[in-house]
Amino acid sequence: MTEAPRSQFLSLHLIETLAAVLPVRDENAQPKSLVFGGAERHMITSQARRRAERVHTRNRANAGRGALRGRSMGVRTREWAILAGRELESAHGWEKEDALVTTRAVMEASGLKFGDPKKRTVANLTKVLIFAPADAATRIADHIADHAAEIKAWRDEYLAAQAEMAARKPRRGAEKKAEAPEVAEGTATAKPTLPPLPKATRDAVLLALAPRDAIDIALYGRFLAEIPDSPNVDGAVQTGHAFTVHESEQIEDFYAAADDAKLDRKRNALSFLDSADDAGAGMTGYQSLISGTFYRHAVLDRSQLRTNLQAAGMDEQEAETAASEAEKEFVNAFVEAFPEAKKNSTASTGSLPALVLAFEGERPYNYASAFQNPVDERPVSAGGEGPAGPAAVRRLLRHHTFVSRRRTDLRTSRVLTYAPEIDALLGELGLPDSLTVVEQIEDLIP
């Protein structure tokens, strides 16, 4: 029997309940929210979700675990010049300052913009985060070391031209006439120009920063506008903002932190007068925490993923193998990964979903509309839907069953739960034959 071809899109939907956490916050350290269905909902942004999933996938691969173990992965940072400089220093014996000045000049001349050279904290950081393969710094350093004489000569000329240009630049508030040097009659001074980076070196930098075979870049994409001839990647993963299925409720948690030294003195004080001097907490404050049941959604475009991998240089069979491995890790990260904000004080990363729904289709399917009307958590006897977790599962599965009867491309629907109460509920709901209950994450993929 011939197996049916897989559909282009794998849609994932998840219900999870969180208590007293703060996975993401705004510029005022407040929980993020949105208004949906006329009610304010707590929100966990897609950016926070994507980073958590991307780092989870990369860490597993680098640790030799999961389907992508041993595969090339990416790093997103502004510190590529610093990393390349350290590689020149440690692997090729360059002096620290010489290495850093060279790598910064080379990358800047390739088209990247850096911070203000007068500000030590940002002088050697690129203006934007650059998502590139993890070995990019090593490749850049190796090329510089292999062509040291030529690049050092170019660097000295480049830095001298930069210094001359900076010296000629009028100071703010000063009149240009006063700044201009006197020029003898009949002569002209040419404006200094920066010498171009040797083509071979620029090509080496662009190749090092190119997506190449970094699997997470093929999955999540990247955009580098500063260098027009450096390839950008349309991501194969689409991620929605997670939001509570019910109206949001925020907790303002007052906390008092103890000062150990003060308490030790108080405990060992010889008189009540001495102990009174050490009364009170060491520090007090407030933190905002949220609780709720969230719906979240993501989708993998299998066709785009294979296109990205082949564009990076893989042949069709290599791309097929890598894409299959990447899909397994994408599903694993969607279920397992969680933003790490306040993870130590809230244990948020230990959460497990109440339900995961996965299915294939010829287009993405977002079921956010199932929760446009916020869940009413009053008891059923009082006209409500009961606790939000089971109520959200009922809504999601009812919505999916309804849509499935009208969209013939939906198939291979599977659900996974980690909640005994939801497992019992699945037995009560009388699920259609087209919906399979599985027990392992890897079984969510047909």
Image: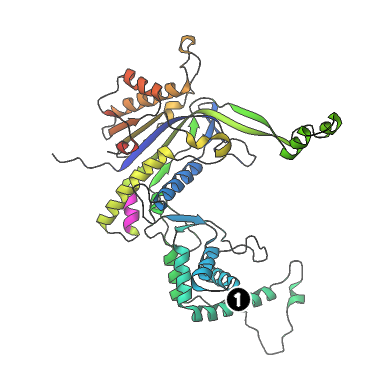
Q: Quadrant of residue 33?
A: top right
How far across and how far down the image is residue 73, in percent? 41, 55
At mark 1, the secondary structure is: helix
Q: Is residue 369 magenta?
A: no
Q: Is residue 299 visible?
A: no
How far across and how far down the image is residue 294, in percent? 48, 30
Magenta residues?
305-310
Residue picked out by circle 1: 159
Nearer to the camera, 406 or 446: 446
**Image quarter hosting the N terminus:** top left
How far across and how far down the image is residue 316, in percent? 26, 56
Q: Is residue 308 magenta?
A: yes
Establish if 418 lies above or below 214.
Answer: above
Establish if 163 lies above or below 306.
Answer: below
Question: Seen from this angle, which residue lies furthest right?
Answer: 273
80 left or right, relative to 331 = right
- Residue sitting at x 58%, y 61%: 125
Question: Seen from this angle, which residue lies furthest left?
Answer: 1
How far across and how far down the image is residue 257, in percent? 69, 35
Nearer to the camera, 294 or 149: 149
- Residue sitting at x 64%, y 34%: 287
* Dominant SS type (magenta): helix
Q: Is residue 403 visible?
A: yes
Nearer to the camera, 307 or 51: 51
Q: Quadrant of residue 102?
A: bottom right
